[in-house]
Amino acid sequence: MREALDMMGYVNAAYVVGVVSTLLLVGWSWLAMTRAEAKRDAVRGK
C-alpha cells in the first residue's frame, strides 16, 4: 500500500482560484467600462 498525497484537492483549489479571479477581473473591467462610458456621455452632453 502506498501512502501518497492526493493531488486532486490542490488541482481543484487551483481551478477555483483561476475561475474566481477571472470572474472578478471580468466584473471589474465591466464596471470600469460602464464608468468610462458614463463619463464620455457626460462630456459629450448626452
Image (cartoon, rainbow, N blue to C red):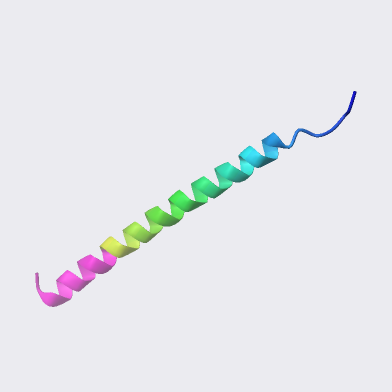
Task: Please name whichever residue, 10 or 39, is drawn nearer the observer in this view of the structure.
Answer: 10
| View extreme (bottom): residue | 43
Residue lying at 23% horizontally and 67% vertically, measured from the top left: 37
Query: For the point 69% across and 35% down, which residue is it?
Result: 8
Residue lying furthest right in this view?
A: 1
Task: Report how many numbered discs are placed on residues in the image.
Answer: 0
Q: Residue furthest top?
A: 1
Image coordinates for residue 9, horizontal then vertical, percent? 68, 35
- Give the side of residue 22 with respect to residue 14, left or right: left
Which residue is found at the position 50% from the left and 46% from the top? 20
Q: Quadrant of residue 32?
A: bottom left
Q: Main secondary structure of the magenta part?
A: helix
Residue 5: percent from left, percent from top? 80, 34
Left/right placement of residue 11 relative to residue 20 reads right
Does the magenta portion include 45?
Answer: yes
Q: Quadrant of residue 11?
A: top right
- At x 44%, y 56%, the residue is 25
Instruction: Report which quarter residue 46 is drawn in.
Output: bottom left
Measured as percent of width and height from the top left, residue 21 is found at: 51, 51
Residue 41 as seen in the image, left or right of residue 3:
left
Q: Which residues are magenta?
A: 35-46
Q: Is residue 27 above or below residue 8?
A: below
Q: In the depicted view, which residue is nearer to us: 20 or 4? A: 4
Q: Nearer the viewer, residue 11 or 17?
A: 11
Quarter holding the N terminus? top right
Query: Residue placed farthest to the front in the image?
Result: 1
**Image position of 40 with respect to 11: above or below:** below
